[in-house]
Image (spheres, coloured by chain):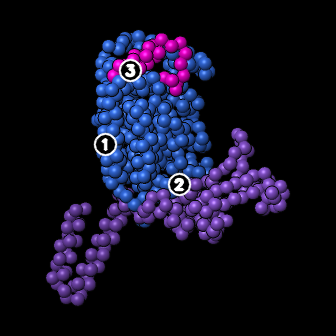
Amino acid sequence: MNLDTLLPNLGEWLRGNGPESDVVVSTRVRLARNLAHYPFTNRATPHQKGEIEAKSRDAVQKAEIASPLQYVNVTTLNPLDRQFLVERQLISRELASVLEGPRGVAFDDKESVSVMINEEDHLRLQVMRSGLALDDAWSVIDGVDDALEARLTYAFHEQFGYLTACPTNVGTGMRASVMLHLPALGLTKQIERVFRALQKINLVVRGLYGEGSRASGDLYQISNQVTLGRSEARVLSEIREVIAMILQYERQARQALLKDRKQEEHNRVARAIGTLSSATMITAEETMELLSTVRLGIHLHMLDDMPPTTVNQLFIQTQAAHLQKIMGGQLDGEERNAARAKFLRSKLREIGSPPR
Amino acid sequence: MDCQLCGEPATVHLTDIVNKKKRQMHLCEGCARKQNLITDDPAPQLNLQPLLQLIMGQMGLLPVDTGGLLCPTCGLKYAQFRATGRLGCPDDYDAFRPALEPLLERIHRGLRHAGKVPVAERAKAAAAHLAGLKDDLAVAVSDERYEDAARIRDRIRKMEVAE
């Protein structure tokens, strides 16, 4: 499969028009599964990993799933292609470059379902959705799980549930994450308080690229920590309750911004557009920060002719691997910053959206 | 000040507070290295997990024998799991159960799975249930409890139809 064919498109989860999309960027549910009668990936021999990969790949390709999954062998990909799949959230950084031996990923053409093989667990199933769609994501992944189980025997324990390499995932093996854009809570310095409240009820807050990554561009992932002793439905409803609360806080903070400092906000948004469309060098980080401001501007109706999808598109296409693919070659740090600025200038000229 | 372990001059001083109890340790660089408290790359820095284990071990917070647990299937020792945080195979959950249960309780505040069950396991459970009912039926007939037998027979038929 030539990954360059993915380049012009956005994964469906980045359409930016799902439920509550003024605050919720996307929803992701993943399941960790392992085959019975094999060691976990970290203790499997290369030969065993090969068997696990062959069996899982066969099951993935033959499984009765609504949208067919295409398998990509990660070991045959060059580093740029691997990074490209990480940026599209189809594989983890670990699968891309930390783990060794036979491994890969299967995903559908909308990039909403993906199955990693030989990650920390033999199988990592993932479903992504635009906006807040926990139930929808669960029902899809539940079906994919059943379809795979019809062809594979999972390691399952009567007391501990689905067995996983790390005890933090045992039980349901489910991690549900909701990616939120919370610029107004950040601006009004209420965000810390919200997150302290979350930790008390066993939910985790992380940056965009999962564990250990920094929150940039005001994007935060909220996910469950507990996988043992609570049903999937209960965990999902706990998350949903918390998200509803955060949505309310963020929207209130946005209204307060409009009421108390509309002029300043307008100025900030206009300057963000100005920098993005005229800089000649710009880092990924600054781009993220400025796009966050633009995204807020769109939802505060300060930029009516720019669709939210555009922000998502710029956000993903200005990341290192995407940019190098678009520009057609390896670029070092400085060249990349220049290429990123050039790309943003031309894209924003195409859209031609001066703030009102 | 001398190293608590070998008596060489101590250059690594650790203070930790666990359960409101303050604990100080003084070690020479060699011993700190042996205890995996210092890693070499990229810059010398403290390795928190072994440090915590060392201190908790000295305070008697870790049961001493768990480190010796061994999984007969994959050969992983519990101590290896503590070092890497990753189990070796599905059978570890039974082999390490006495040590894992307190850990799972801390992480999840729960010890019994309460979610989805694989279709194959569901079928197994249903089959076992059906076999149990048939057994009950035979006993009810031989005891001449015909009303009970009729009720059990109806449940068996219902289950067989559902399949």
* Chain given the colour purple: B
Looking at the image, residue B49 sits to the left or right of residue A143; the answer is right
Crowd class of label 3 (few under 14; some 14 to 19; many from 20; radius 10 Å): few
The disc, 3 or 1, on the residue closer to the chain's N-terminal end is 1
Write the residue at 19% across / 67% down. B158
Q: Position of residue A139 (x, y in %)?
A: 31, 46
Q: Position of residue A69 (x, y in %)?
A: 40, 38
* Residue marked by disc 3: A264
Write the residue at 52% across / 26% down. A285
* Residue marked by disc 2: A165
Please name which of the two marks, 1 or 2, marks the residue nearer to the observer: 1
Q: Which residues are magenta?
A: A262-287
Q: State the hue of chain A.
A: blue
**Nearer to us in this view, A301 or A339:** A301
Please name which of the two marks, 3 or 1, marks the residue nearer to the observer: 3
Looking at the image, residue A282 sits to the left or right of residue A189; the answer is right
- Which amino acid is tagged 1? Ala
- Which amino acid is tagged 3? Glu
Residue B1 position by quadrant: bottom right
Mark linked to residue A62: none
Q: Position of residue A330 (x, y in %)?
A: 59, 21
Height in image: A50 above or below A273? Answer: below
Residue A171 shows up from this direction: no
Looking at the image, residue B64 sits to the left or right of residue B29; the answer is left
Tell me, yes or no, whether the highlighted magenta stretch contains residue A282: yes
Mark linked to residue A244: 1
The disc, 1 or 2, on the residue closer to the chain's N-terminal end is 2
The disc, 2 or 3, on the residue closer to the chain's N-terminal end is 2
In space, the residues marked 3 and 1 are separated at their CA atoms by: 28 Å
